[in-house]
Image: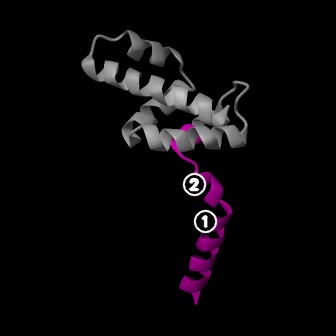
Amino acid sequence: MRFVTSFLCAAAIWTVNLPAAQAGVIEQACRKSERAYNKAGLCSCIQAVADQRLTRSERVTVSKWFADPHQAQVVRQSDRRSDERLWERYKAFGETAARACG
């Protein structure tokens, strides 16, 4: 009986936190951002575009740029080929997000 009670409590907690747990890293970073665009619907839209345009690894990297935009500039100005590819994919993502999310 103790196991069943523990399981039900855990399930209830998980269910209550489900929306936050489902939010992707971009959406979470967007919502925490102090910028004007931290509206839930917009952040959700940006996440949906990121899911289509960026790899999981790229989404994790880009999500950190919300808190530290300077890191985006470091990647943009880098001579590393991998950073150049990331920047190109990020620009394409940004253009798509701007069109889709207005």
User: In the rendered structure, which amino acid carries the disc numbered 2?
Assistant: Ala
Horizontally, residue 48 falls left or right of residue 40, namely left
Horizontally, residue 92 falls left or right of residue 46, namely left
Q: Residue at x 43, y 31 (%)?
A: 61
Horizontally, residue 10 falls left or right of residue 73, namely right
Q: Quadrant of the N terminus?
A: bottom right
Q: Quadrant of the C terminus?
A: top right
- SS at badge 2: helix
Question: Is 5 colored magenta in this rendering?
Answer: yes
Q: Up-down: is 34 above or below 100?
A: above
Foreground pick, 62 / 8: 62
Question: Is 78 colored magenta in this rendering?
Answer: no
Residue 60 pos. (x, y %): 44, 36
Where does the magenta region start and end?
A: 1-27
Q: Residues within 10 Å of mark 2 (few under 14, many from 20)?
A: few
Q: Which residue is mark 1?
A: 14
Q: Residue at x 65, y 35 (%)?
A: 101
User: In the rendered structure, which amino acid carries the disc numbered 1?
Assistant: Trp
Q: Earlier in the sequence, mark 1 or mark 2?
A: 1
Q: Residue furthest bottom?
A: 1
Foreground pick, 97 / 31: 97
Q: Which residue is mark 2?
A: 21
Q: Residue at x 47, y 23 (%)?
A: 91
Q: Residue at x 61, y 36 (%)?
A: 100
Asked where in the image residue 56 lies, by quadrant, the reply is top left
Q: Residue furthest front?
A: 99
Most common secondary structure along the magenta stretch = helix
